[in-house]
Image: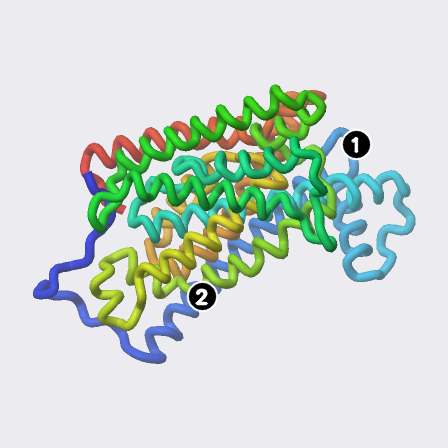
Amino acid sequence: MNIVRRAPALGAAEPPAPSGAGALAGMERSLWPRFLVAGVALMGAIVLATAVGPAGIPLDATVRIILSRLTGVETGDSLPALWRDIIWEVRLPRVLLAGLTGAVLAMAGATYQGVFRNPLADPYLIGVATGAALGATAVIVSDTPHSWQGLSVLPLAAFGGAVVSVLLVYSVARVGNTVPTTTLILAGVAVASLSTAITSFLMLRSTTHMFSVLSVVLGSFNTATWGELTWALPYAVPAAVVILAHGRVLNVLSLDEEQARQLGINPERTKLVLLGVASLAAAAAVSVAGTIGFVGLIVPHAVRLIWGPDNRQLLPMSILFGATFLILADLLARTVDQPSEIPVGIITAVCGVPFFLYLLRRARMGAYW
């Protein structure tokens, strides 16, 4: 059953909408408080996750160390050097990489849902994440250089695997101009299973790289560095700019492609651009953090349920809350079973599977979003 909200009939009566600058100004006034709250929540999660760890560093000391590094003003010079090294070289890169990964996966999930007009699409369920993991694994086990001219090639290899997966899933699941939910999920599961099987085979054939491949398969930030963060940013930031600029266009595509053509939008070209940049961003995240499932499903749905389906606010709010969610999930992963550490992908799966089953239940009952 199709659970995507359809456009109203052409002859149906609709309430008059505000026009012109007044409508835009009203929307901006309503958005800024939401962005402010989401931004404050994200900053709080960053500070909390950076402060918490095996070494007991007070919260105020953590803030002083971060501010001294960012501003150049020595506010933490009286603190132990070991504390400064732990905060700046170990914890903060990990927290920021988790935030970047969560933001990218949530943004990609919201984009896929809009392009496919299917609320159950996300980088994990439709095989994009596992395809990206396969591409990254192929580079890891081949002993080829992981960087060229200071730019990591892992995201590009992961992007190749992601593109192949999304094209295969889309071509199998598409029926006419629609992509049925059941077919999309089944095709995604099949492609993801095949990618995982090949990745496992490559891992067994190259035991010297088993730890690196396991980090890609299970998802982990325990080896995060500033270098990995700078590797992913050149791919994630331009993709975010392109996707955010298409918020209004994605609203039109989510309703009806014929209406999009009447407004001068080329649906196929626009979908190709959005799928390409979303897959590139997701692949970059997978190449540095591994396959972390359900972030792209949980976060856009939570935002949509609270603030509605308008992509002009859904996309940026998904980015902010995706970063916050994965930072807190990683914090839970490294503290719930100390001194051991749980792969963060397990935490997101524990959160995501019940939510996914809930969505399927609503779909079976004919609920709309």
Assign a secondary structure to mark 2: helix
In the image, is 11 to the left or to the right of 215?
Answer: left
Q: Nearer the viewer, residue 119 or 154?
A: 154
Q: Indicate whether 217 appears above or below 26.
A: above
Residue 108 placed where, x, y %? 46, 49
Residue 55 in sight: yes
Residue, x 35% and y 64% (percent of image)?
249
Q: Nearer the viewer, mark 2 or mark 1?
A: 2
Disc 1 target residue: 55
Q: Which mark is residue 317?
A: none
Q: Secondary structure at mark 1?
A: loop
Three-letter residue code for mark 1 = Ala
**Residue 50 visible within the image:** no
Q: Amino acid at mark 2?
A: Ala
Q: CA distance from mark 2 to mark 1?
A: 43 Å
Residue at 29% over, 49% down? 117
Image side of residue 353 versus residue 320, left or right: left
In the depicted view, which residue is nearer to us: 217 or 98?
Answer: 217
Q: Is residue 178 left or right of residue 327?
A: left
Q: Foreground residue, 244 or 126?
A: 126
Q: Which residue is mark 2?
A: 245
Residue situated furthest bottom in the rendering: 21
Which of the 4 image quadrants contains residue 213? Answer: top right
Q: Nearer the viewer, residue 217 or 241?
A: 217
The quadrant in which the N terminus is found is top left
Q: Which residue is pictured at 79% across the width and 32% down the height?
A: 55
Query: Badge 1, how many Cα within 10 Å: few under 14, some, many 20+?
Result: few
Q: Position of residue 110 (x, y in %)?
A: 40, 49
Residue lying at the far left of the rendered structure: 11
